[in-house]
Image (cartoon, rainbow, N blue to C red):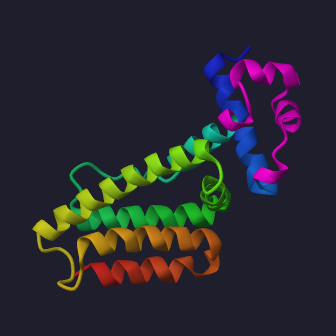
C-alpha cells in the first residue's frame, strides 16, 4: 500500500492530467479517485477539499519549470540552459503549459491559487533578477538590456508560449539573441 505522501502525489498527478485534458471546470473529484484507484471518500483523507488539490496541482506544475543546470555555469550558460529547458519542456510536456495557463486564469478568481501563483512568480522574478544581475556585473548582456525589463520579458515569453506554443521556439531564440552580447 502506498505511503501517504506517495498517494498524495498520485492524486495530484491524476488531477494534473485531468486539468490538462478538460481544464479546471471539468475537474471531478470522483474521477480523480477512480484514476488513482481509491474510494471518493478516501480522497478527503489526503486533501480536505478540491481547492487543496488545485493548490497541489499548481505546486506540481510549477515544479516542472525548474531547470537543472551544471554547477559552475555562468550567467549566459545558465540563461541559455534555462531557455533550452523551457523549449524542451514545451516540446516534450506541453500539458505543463496548458495547466499553467489554466492556473494563471484561475488565479484571477481563486485566492488559494492566486497565493500559490504569486509566491511562485515572486521566486521566479527573484531568480531571474539574480541571474541577470550576475550577467550584468560581468557585462555579459547586450548594452541595451535593462535587467528589470529583461526579467519581465522572459516571463512574458514563457506565458505567451502557454497560449501560442507554435511560436514559442522562435520567441525563445529571439530572447536569447536579444539578451546575449
User: Viewed as shown, does residue 21 lie left or right of 111?
Assistant: right
Q: Is residue 41 magenta?
A: yes
| Residue shown at the point (84%, 35%) measured from the top left | 35
Q: Quadrant of the N terminus?
A: top right
Which of the pair 5/49 is nearer the observer? 49
**Residue 134 against residue 153 in the figure, above or below:** above
The quadrant in which residue 167 appears is bottom right
Q: Is residue 165 magenta?
A: no
| Residue shown at the point (50%, 83%) measured from the top left | 170
The boundaries of the magenta stretch are: 24-52
| Residue shown at the point (46%, 61%) measured from the top left | 85
Q: Quadrant of the C terminus?
A: bottom left
User: Residue 139: horizontal and vertical position, in percent?
Assistant: 12, 74
The quadrant in which residue 105 appears is bottom right
User: Residue 142: horizontal and vertical position, in percent?
Assistant: 21, 82
User: Residue 175: horizontal and vertical position, in percent?
Assistant: 39, 79
Amino acid at each position: 500500500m502506498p505511503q501517504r505522501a506517495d498517494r498524495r502525489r498520485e492524486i495530484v498527478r491524476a488531477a494534473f492530467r485531468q486539468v490538462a485534458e478538460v481544464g479546471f471546470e471539468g475537474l471531478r473529484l470522483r474521477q480523480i479517485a477512480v484514476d488513482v484507484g481509491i474510494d471518493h471518500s478516501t480522497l478527503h483523507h489526503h486533501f480536505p477539499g478540491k481547492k487543496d488539490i488545485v493548490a497541489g496541482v499548481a505546486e506540481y506544475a510549477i515544479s516542472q519549470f525548474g531547470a537543472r543546470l551544471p554547477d559552475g555555469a555562468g550567467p549566459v550558460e545558465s540563461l541559455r540552459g534555462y531557455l533550452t529547458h523551457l523549449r524542451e519542456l514545451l516540446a516534450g510536456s506541453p500539458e505543463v503549459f496548458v495547466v499553467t495557463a489554466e492556473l494563471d486564469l484561475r488565479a484571477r478568481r481563486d485566492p488559494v491559487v492566486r497565493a500559490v501563483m504569486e509566491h511562485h512568480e515572486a521566486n521566479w522574478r527573484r531568480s531571474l533578477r539574480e541571474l541577470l544581475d550576475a550577467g550584468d556585473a560581468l557585462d555579459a548582456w547586450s548594452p541595451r538590456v535593462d535587467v528589470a525589463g529583461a526579467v519581465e520579458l522572459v516571463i512574458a515569453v514563457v506565458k505567451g508560449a502557454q497560449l501560442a506554443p507554435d511560436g514559442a521556439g522562435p520567441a525563445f531564440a529571439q530572447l536569447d539573441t536579444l539578451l546575449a552580447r
